[in-house]
Image (cartoon, grey):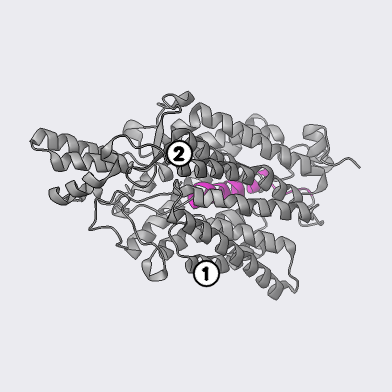
Amino acid sequence: MSIRPLQNLRRTAVAGASLLLLCAASPALAGSPTPNPGDTAWMLTSSALVLMMSIPGLALFYGGLVRIKNMASILTQTFTIVALVGVLWTLYGYSLAFGDGGALNAVIGGLGKVFLKGVDANAVSPTFTPGHVIPEYAYFVFQMTFAMITPALIIGAFAERMKFSAVFVFILLWVTVIYFPIAHWVWAVADPNAIVDAAAELAAATTDAAKQAAQAKIDAATSSVGWLAGGLAPWMKGVGALDFAGGTVVHINAGIAGLVGAIMVGKRIGYGKEALPPHSLTLSMVGASLLWVGWFGFNAGSNLEANGTTALAFVNTMVATAAAALSWLLTEWATKGKPSLLGLISGAVAGLVAVTPASGFAGPIGSLALGFIVSPICLFFVSKVKNAIGYDDALDVFGVHCIGGITGALATGLLVSPALGGVGITDYTNIAESYAGKYDLVAQMIAQVTAVVATLIWSGVGSAILYKVVDLVIGLRPAPDQEREGLDITDHGERAYNY
């Protein structure tokens, strides 16, 4: 689900005659819009693809990278997180992320949709085209899969050394306190149908009272958005941050939480003193491949429709990932003397992460360049920076997801420029024609940096507090002898393999 800026709408003077012509042609005014079957089918397919990214994709990718004594542990943690977040999302997460928060709407959604109140088979959610909607159930489950995979990414940072009970409680708290608010900040956007319809009422109004009522509807529609999406921070001058599919919400968010966890939990026993190699690069390669395939639902599905922008996001995801995989391979080959499978699949994931925020805004050549650039940056962090500082980010969650996400988020502010092959800034309501297509580099980069910094602070500081609370209540780490034996046996009483 992307951020679509609706900048300056409140300051837009809508000319009566031209707007009447526009609104007369708008499907939104011909009656209640109904979902397009193709859009609905694509959104449900995308939801299944994103679920596949978590289980089995991420589970196998992470599982292959740990030692054999912790394989079942990683699989169990990943699958449990998917199930836990699915329940929380249904009970209250969807409402906190996308409900109406009233006076607090810029910060958090409300409780109006707790237990899916008001959501049924007839309910619809807007897309980004006036007159177009999808079933709200389709939107609900699509967003659920994003909420599932984000906390699952975190566990790679402290893999092999955190108790299952601690993981369970931490994730329950983290999605509630960290993920749901940030999802609201970034993805709670205005309804173009409501804006266009209200603008039509304004143009047709003949009395002051009718004009005031119509203007109030426009103001309500354009203000009931998350603060990062709407550009509500004064220094952003009304320019919303661009994040097509979750560079901030998912990758930077999970990546910084992972780094904080890796530091607070501490290093694995033997880290830096003995080899801790992956037990199955074969399974990790299978997992990475499933991630790549599932990511088409992640990025292209975030357009909420099946149209040309969907195809653009699909193509950008393909080319950026290919470029990043090749770039990591070649960089590692040049610097270390051998091209590795681990480097190849790590590069692919870095490319997927980086193109996520840019996928619907950049052009294919810009995405290709982004893929080539992101891998050397991430490789530098997972090797040089991690070794220099000495933190034990077991599966390089920070180095790939956080750093790759930051790279992609900042690059999106550049690659959206038409001069670089991007789509430019679009007014998705089509009523601010004087604004559509304009691009302000400085304002857009301020918005991108603001979104990155806000995510780092909220998730970094908030996660540190939550880790400390869990540590004080139940403890984060198993006993040293349990860690040496492996979490498969000590936490779950079973092994991933019988031999």
Range shown magenta: 246-269
Question: Which quadrant of the rendered structure holds the C terminus?
Answer: top right
- Which residue: 58% across, 45% down? 50
Which residue is more in the foreground, 185 or 8? Answer: 8
Which image quadrant is residue 166 in? top right
The three-letter amino acid code for the residue at tag 2 is Pro
Answer yes or no: is residue 246 visible: no
Q: Say which of marks 2 and 1 sits in front.
A: 1
Whether residue 340 is visible here, answered yes or no, is yes
Residue farthest along the left direction in this orientation: 207
Please tell me whether residue 71 belongs to the stretch shown in magenta: no
Q: Main secondary structure of the magenta part?
A: helix
Residue 369 shows which numbered tag? 1
Q: Is residue 255 magenta?
A: yes
Which residue, given by chain and number where applicable, does mark 2 sit on? 181
Q: Position of residue 413 (x, y in %)?
A: 41, 61
Q: CA distance from mark 2 to mark 1?
A: 32 Å
Could you classify mark 2 by the number of other residues whose Cα lies within 10 Å: few (under 14), some (14-19), or many (20 or more)?
Answer: many
Count the labels in the image.
2
Residue 48, position as x, y percentages in the image: 59, 41
Between 151 and 497, the residue placed more toward the observer is: 497
Q: Is residue 222 above or below residue 442?
A: above
Going by the numbered disc 1, the residue's amino acid type is Ala
Residue 81 position in % (x across, y down): 63, 36
Q: Position of residue 113 (x, y in %)?
A: 43, 27
Q: Crowding near pointer 1: few (<14 within 10 Å), some, many (20+)?
A: some
In-image side of 321 versus 310 (left or right): right
Question: What residue do we see at 45% from left, 52% from top?
Answer: 244
